[in-house]
Amino acid sequence: MWDNESGIGRRRPTEPVAAFAGSLGLEIKLLPPRAPESKGMVERINRFFGQRFMPGRDFRSPADFNGQLEDWLPKANHRYSRSRHGRPDELIVPDREKMRELPPVTPEAVFGNAVRLPEYLRFWGPSVVCLGAGWQSAQ
């Protein structure tokens, strides 16, 4: 399941996302917009990390964050979860037994960054004027 965010496409996955999921034999189910009951588990996990992991910590770098998280996760996953009636590190064992192996071919993954500028910005240059999303020659 995936939140209906623009990173993978609106209302349907973009072609690269669909290809990546297909190469792993996965189906992406987009959650409906404005349906918080569908996203409760994701939001609960975010709140759990925000309340249990983040307070009182400082991170010097992404590697430091990952290192602290790696040290903390075994403790967090060994706690008893009333809603799941068990410890996450024990409950995952039967789930892993049901999982398929990854395909022998590594799926193609391309990551990139794009900076989106607000449409109301104007850029004036020696030969080009950008007005929002449209380009126009300066005369």
Image: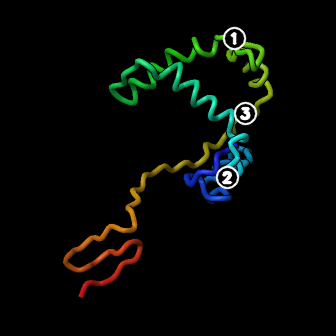
Identity, as a three-letter code, of the amino acid under mark 1: Tyr
Mark 1 vs mark 2: give the one in front. 2
User: Mark 1–mark 3 contact, CB under 8 Å?
Assistant: no
Give the residue type at disc 2.
Pro
Q: CA distance from mark 1 to mark 3?
A: 29 Å
State which quarter of the image contains the C terminus.
bottom left
> Residue 22 at what x, y percent from top left?
70, 50
Q: Residues within 10 Å of mark 3 (few under 14, many from 20)?
A: few
Q: Quadrant of the N terminus?
A: top right
Mark closer to the chain start, 1 or 2: 2
Quarter where residue 138 is shown? bottom left
Here the colouring is rainbow
**Total numbered circles:** 3
> Label 2, on which residue?
33
Whole-percent x, y for residue 98 in the image: 80, 28
Q: Is 88 located above or below residue 106 in the figure? A: above
Tell whether label 2 touches label 1 (CB within 8 Å): no
Q: Which secondary structure, mark 3? A: loop
Near mark 1 (Cα within 10 A), the count class, few <14, some 14-19 or many ≥20, is some
Numbered disc in front, either 1 or 3: 1
Quarter assignment of residue 115: bottom left
> Residue, x 53% and y 22% (percent of image)?
51
Q: Is 24 left, or right, of 73 in this rendering?
A: right
How would you rate the neighbour count of disc 2 (Cα within 10 Å): few for under 14, some for 14-19, many for 20 or more?
Answer: few
Query: Residue at the spot x=72%, y=40% of the render?
Result: 37
Question: At x 63% / y 16%, what residue is drawn?
Answer: 77
Expressed as whole percent of the image width and height from the top left, the position of residue 5 reads: 59, 51
Q: Which mark is residue 101?
A: 3
